[in-house]
């Protein structure tokens, strides 16, 4: 690649980064609402007096920007097209806002990438059902932390249980409390809270005792839980860099249909 071509590529990349960063900054600052100007001035003065406020905002912007960059990359389109699609109607704009704020409140890379997957899937979808699906996943993942996602991924696998081979028609496999504990022993103290949150969000459900055995408290992923897992596994498993192009097949398929 000659010097001129390299320079042109860098200009395009810089412009794309500016689009993403400007959008994220504006969306996070929009919390001030109709009093944005006076409130922003007041906040600016406060930031000068309390540097940690500037650091907190920078942290939120960094996380949200990271999510946006991954979403653009996994969608397989340029940032301008991505933003144009999200600006198309109120529902898409709301999807973007929810995703940015959810990512801004996250410090988990795994969670940020999962949010990016959901945003990428709904971004250029013309089917309202796909957009609604992405919104629900974003709302659920926004309430989870890395430990919840770790248990979610665990429940999608199968434990060392002889009954697994005898009940091929039961999938995803329902885990007993002891099996879950054995899978993540370091989380034993907080497992009740983790499982309660997953169940409250409709990600897991109680599995009736007697269908396999009479073990109380088996937990099984719901259909919605499996949907959340699609986004989690797509990105967490591939570990793509935003500069390496599309990595989410579902979002790309929706956008190019």
Image (spheres, helix red, strand yellow):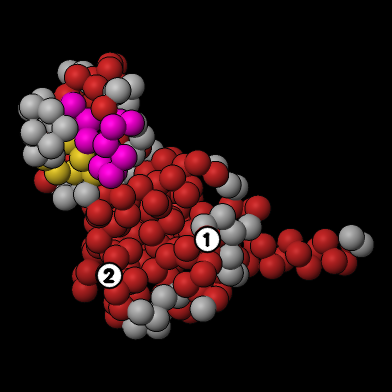
Q: Is residue 23 left or right of residue 229?
A: right
Per the picture, the main secondary structure of the magenta-coloured stretch is: loop
Image location of residue 247, percent across then percent down: 56, 55
| Residue range highlighted in magenta | 164-176
User: Is 172 covered by the magenta stretch?
Assistant: yes
Q: In terms of image quadrants, where is residue 183?
A: top left
Q: Is residue 240 left or right of residue 160?
A: right
Residue pointed to by mark 2: 132
Q: Is residue 249 left or right of residue 28?
A: right
Q: At numbered mark 1, what does the secondary structure look like: helix, strand or loop? A: helix
Residue 113 drawn above or below residue 37: above
Q: Nearer the viewer, residue 2 or 160?
A: 160
- Quick one: label 1 or label 2, which is nearer the N terminus? 2
Residue pointed to by mark 1: 249
Q: What residue is drawn where x is 85% and y is 66%? A: 5
Q: What residue is drawn where x is 32% and y is 68%? A: 95
Residue extending furthest toward the right: 2
Q: Is residue 110 left or right of residue 198?
A: right
Would you call the spot at circle 2 few (<14 residues within 10 Å), some (14-19), or many (20 or more)? some
Residue extending furthest toward the front: 166
Q: In terms of image quadrants, where is residue 120?
A: bottom left
Q: In terms of image quadrants, where is residue 131?
A: bottom left
Q: Nearer the viewer, mark 1 or mark 2?
A: 1
Residue 207 drawn above or below residue 130: above
Q: Quadrant of the N terminus?
A: bottom right
Q: At numbered mark 2, what does the secondary structure look like: helix, strand or loop? A: helix
- Please say whether residue 1 is visible from this viewpoint: yes
Q: What residue is drawn where x is 13% and y is 37%? A: 211
């Amino acid at each position: 690649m000659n010097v001129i071509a390299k320079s042109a590529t860098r200009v395009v990349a810089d412009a794309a980064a500016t689009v993403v960063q400007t959008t994220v900054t504006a969306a996070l600052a929009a919390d001030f609402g109709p009093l944005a100007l006076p409130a922003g001035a007041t906040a600016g003065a406060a930031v000068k007096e309390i540097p940690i406020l500037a650091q907190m905002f920078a942290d939120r912007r960094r996380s949200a920007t990271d999510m946006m960059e991954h979403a653009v990359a996994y969608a397989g389109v340029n940032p301008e097209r991505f933003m144009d699609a999200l600006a198309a109607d109120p529902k898409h704009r709301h999807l973007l806002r929810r995703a940015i704020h959810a990512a801004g409140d996250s410090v988990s890379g795994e969670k940020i990438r999962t949010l990016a997957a959901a945003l990428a899937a709904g971004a250029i979808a013309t089917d309202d059902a796909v957009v609604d699906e992405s919104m629900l996943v974003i709302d659920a993942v926004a309430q989870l932390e890395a430990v919840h996602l770790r248990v979610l991924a665990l429940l999608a696998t199968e434990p060392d249980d002889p009954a697994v081979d005898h009940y091929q028609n039961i999938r995803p496999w329902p885990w007993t409390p002891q099996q879950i504990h054995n899978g993540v022993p370091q989380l034993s103290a907080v497992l009740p809270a983790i499982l309660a949150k997953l169940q409250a969000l409709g990600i897991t459900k109680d599995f009736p005792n007697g269908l396999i055995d009479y073990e109380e408290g088996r937990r099984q992923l719901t259909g919605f839980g499996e949907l959340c897992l699609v986004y989690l596994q797509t990105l967490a498993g591939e570990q793509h860099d935003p500069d390496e192009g599309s990595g989410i097949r579902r979002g790309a398929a929706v956008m190019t249909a």
